[in-house]
Amino acid sequence: MKSVHYTDKGKVRQHNEDSVGVFSNKEGDCLAVVADGMGGHRAGDVASSMTINRFEELWKAEGKITTAEQAEKWLQDKIKEINLNVYQHSKSNTDCEGMGTTVVAAICTENFATIVNIGDSRGYIFNESGFSQLTEDHSLVNELVRSGQISKEDAEHHPRKNVLLRALGTEEKVEMDTRTIIFEEEDLILLCSDGLSNKVSEEEMKEILTNSDDLDQAGKQFISLANENGGEDNISLAIVKYTPESRNG
């Protein structure tokens, strides 16, 4: 697998509360994670960095992931563990009271990719069928769209756009969405925080991925365009591409 990851505090925020990482286990399988510490809460950066760091520890100790069921169970079990860690930390440290984070993570193997998400950080797939979103935002605005109360266009500028219905670490138990897709040569997975998806359209994302010479160039263009379009939030992304040489390690 080839991969890149980037995070940028943007043009407005004083601090970067996002964390991002891409890790390989002992068998060469890949785990990509983006976490967006909850804005407006103290210690959002603590919640997101705790999440990424623990995922890295757990993944590097993991053996071969051979089935989708194994990948889904691994992600679900580890997120429950990490959620409890973050929640307990917030309860025992007054400086961190109320902290939380979104999370979107993808296990990428030679046969499939399994994606889990909580909150409004997103996962996308770019393959021969085109570019499409794999995750559903756990946000008030997305629920209003799904129930037909507002249009997608209304959602873009809704005053409560940033209200999340789920986050990691804010409660003792957490619900998440998990799905598995076929992952083949030249397919590409993009994970990002809302600092990117709010500022760069799906059409622009597809165009950048189509026209970039390499993943580094694409990642830098994403950050640059999100900042050009306002950069009001932290911007984070991870890209994993299944390259032909992946099969040889």
Image: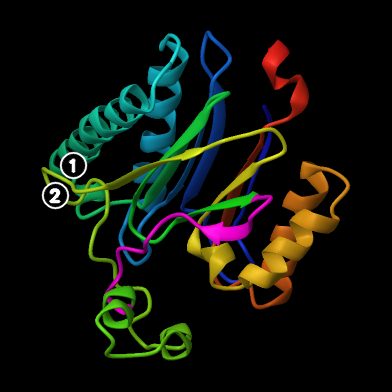
The answer to if 153 sits in the magenta stretch is: no
Asked whether residue 133 is drawn in magenta, I would say yes
User: Seen from this angle, which residue lies furthest right?
Assistant: 213
206 relative position to 123: left or right: right
Could you say where residue 84 lies in the image, as x and y percent from the top left?
18, 35
Q: Please, what is the three-letter code of the amino acid marked with disc 2?
A: Glu
Mark 2 packing: few (<14 Cα in 10 Å), some, or many (20+)?
some
- Name the residue beneath numbered marker 1: 87
C-alpha separation, residue under disc 2 versus residue under disc 1: 6 Å
In the rendered image, the quadrant that contains the C terminus is top right
The amino acid type, in three-letter code, at marker 1 is Tyr
Whether residue 13 is visible here, answered yes or no, is no
Q: Position of residue 149 (x, y in %)?
A: 27, 90
Q: Nearer the viewer, residue 142 or 35?
A: 142
Location of residue 181 with respect to 13 vertically, above or below: above
Image side of residue 230 versus residue 173, left or right:
right
Which residue corresponds to the image point at 54% horizontal and 9% vertical from the top-left? Answer: 27
Look at the image and name its color scheme. Answer: rainbow
- Front residue of 69 and 166: 69
- Find disc 2 in the rendering and name its residue: 171
- Dot 2 or dot 1, earlier in sequence: 1
Residue for point 18% across, 42% down: 87
Q: Residue at x 68, y 77 (%)?
A: 229
Q: Position of residue 62 (x, y in %)?
A: 41, 12
Q: Secondary structure at mark 1?
A: helix
x and y percentages locating residue 197 in the rendered image: 55, 66
Q: Is residue 117 left or right of residue 76?
A: right
The boundaries of the magenta stretch are 127-141
Q: Tags 2 and 1 in contact by the CB under 8 Å rule?
A: yes
Q: Is residue 217 left or right of residue 63?
A: right
Up/down of 58 relative to 165, above or below: above
